[in-house]
Amino acid sequence: MFAVLRNRTYRHLFTAQVVALVGTGLATVALSLLAYDLAGADASAVLGTALAIKMVAYVGIAPLVGALAGRIPRRALLVSMDLLRAGVAFSLPFVTQVWQVYVLIFLLQCASAAFTPAFQATIPRLLPEERDYTRALSLSRLAYDLESLFSPALAAGLLTAISYNWLFAGTALGFLASATLVVSVLLPAPAPVERTGSGRPKASMGARLFFATPRLRALLCLDLAVAAGGAMVTVNTVVLVRDSLHRSAGDIPWALGAFGGGSMAAALLLPRLLDRAGDRALMLPAAFVLPGVLAALSLGTAVAPGRWAWPALLAAWALLGAASSVVLTPSARLLRRSATAADLPAAFAARFSLSHGCWLLSYPLAGSLAVWAGLSTAAGALAGVSLAAAVAAVVLWPRRDPGHLGHVHSALPAGHPHVRDAVATGAGWWHGHDYRIDALHTRWPASARSSAKV
């Protein structure tokens, strides 16, 4: 897995990702404690709203950045967004009102919505070999998991000596270090972006890819299943630990760390598993673990807690982390398989935006239900959402999903370069190749043997 770090440019970008994630992890703990200070037992509602605002920024900004990514120097975009995020993080310790939290979170996440898809679209250009790219994806997932494990532990240690407000300073330093590392390397130029007749980039290309490609439609359902489980962890951990189990604030990082530990364990195993099994064979079963754990959590929170409650919560969070990792880690492989090089930035931006639309639904649902109907009801409702999403993914993702598909072009003229190797039929020009939605292929063939017109 670690052989890809021999690539200097990727090594610097990966390190930038790691240090920024550690800072973000510190901010997650600090934001939970800040919300509890400002709202007390209603902290779940405050966190749910703040995270919903985060998702609004992601859903609205990412597609615009994806459309413009081919025109903006990649390094300048990444560095400027890191600097903006650092400035916002420095401001968070000074807030005194809930509305101020909401404004700063929106600005911070607008910058992240611009940074993350551009960063993700750069990696396939650096590592064109499938094996190397798979290892890079697992390393990236491992970085997220180490952040989920290490940052809460670091926060727990720091909280014994300093106020949680100082954790935001650590967040800002992480973003500044990330910007420095990005500046230190030259990044590959984006692939040429296909333009419409008006000369404007196709801002809708990423969304078209998702809604026209069966495996990507299934991926959106899987994102919803993961979001339902993740929202329960992110929004309600602070209330579960402080109010339900009556434990100290220092136990919040350990609960969040259990989620990261489970995710990390799965990420370490995935490269070998992906070499032996397909993405579908791993991702779909993992998706059904999520509603199972949430349903068990719903039952557990409906009864009075005993000595078993704390270890049971840690185990549940670890299982949710592991299942989420198995679903999310291979997802970028599906994007790479489903989009041309020129359309990858738009594909990553669309996935970023659409997947966070799932979180936009799950975050306020987790927070509002926990406040108004109780944690048991919130967990039960999220279990239902996760189960429905997992079932939909099974239905939408064909069991047989080859890359090479035969199809007919009925509208292209005989001299068009794309059909020079095609066979003339009564319906048009028939040929086969690795099929991706683009300007010449606007619909998905009905099956691998299909002669569907495009």
Image (cartoon, rainbow, N blue to C red):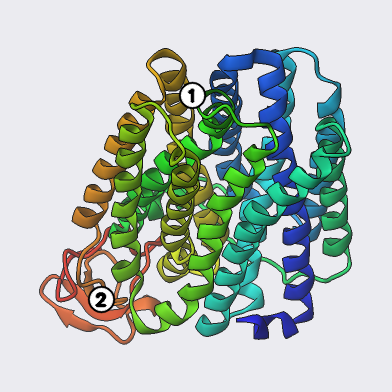
Mark 1 secondary-structure assignment:
helix
Q: Which numbered disc, 2 or 1, marks the residue that appears first in the sequence?
A: 1
Is residue 69 visible in the rendered image? The answer is no
Q: Which residue is drawn at 13% across and 78% down?
A: 425
Cα separation, mark 2 vs mark 1, equals 45 Å
Quadrant of the frame with the C terminus: bottom left
Q: Mark 2 points at which residue?
A: 405
Residue 194 is marked as: none
Quadrant of the frame with the N terminus: bottom right
57 with respect to 359 (left or right) = right
Mark 2 secondary-structure assignment:
strand
Mark 1 Cα within 10 Å, few/some/many (few <14, many 20+)?
many
Say if 61 sits above or below 196 in the image. Answer: above
Residue 409, by quadrant, is: bottom left
Is residue 421 visible in the rendered image? The answer is yes
Q: Nearer the viewer, mark 2 or mark 1?
A: 1
User: Nearest the camera: 151 or 302?
Assistant: 302
Residue 108 location in percent, x, y?
73, 35
Q: What residue type is labelled 1?
A: Gly
Say if 225 sits above or below 71 in the image. Answer: above
User: Nearest the camera: 312 or 197?
Assistant: 312
Residue 43 location in percent, x, y?
60, 20
Q: Name the residue under label 1.
A: 367
Q: Which residue is most to the front?
A: 307
Q: Residue at x 44, y 28 (%)?
A: 366
97 with respect to 54 (left or right) = right
Kindly indicate whether the residue at mark 1 contacts the one at mark 2 (C-beta within 8 angstroms): no
Residue 386 location in percent, x, y?
32, 42
Residue 415 location in percent, x, y?
35, 78
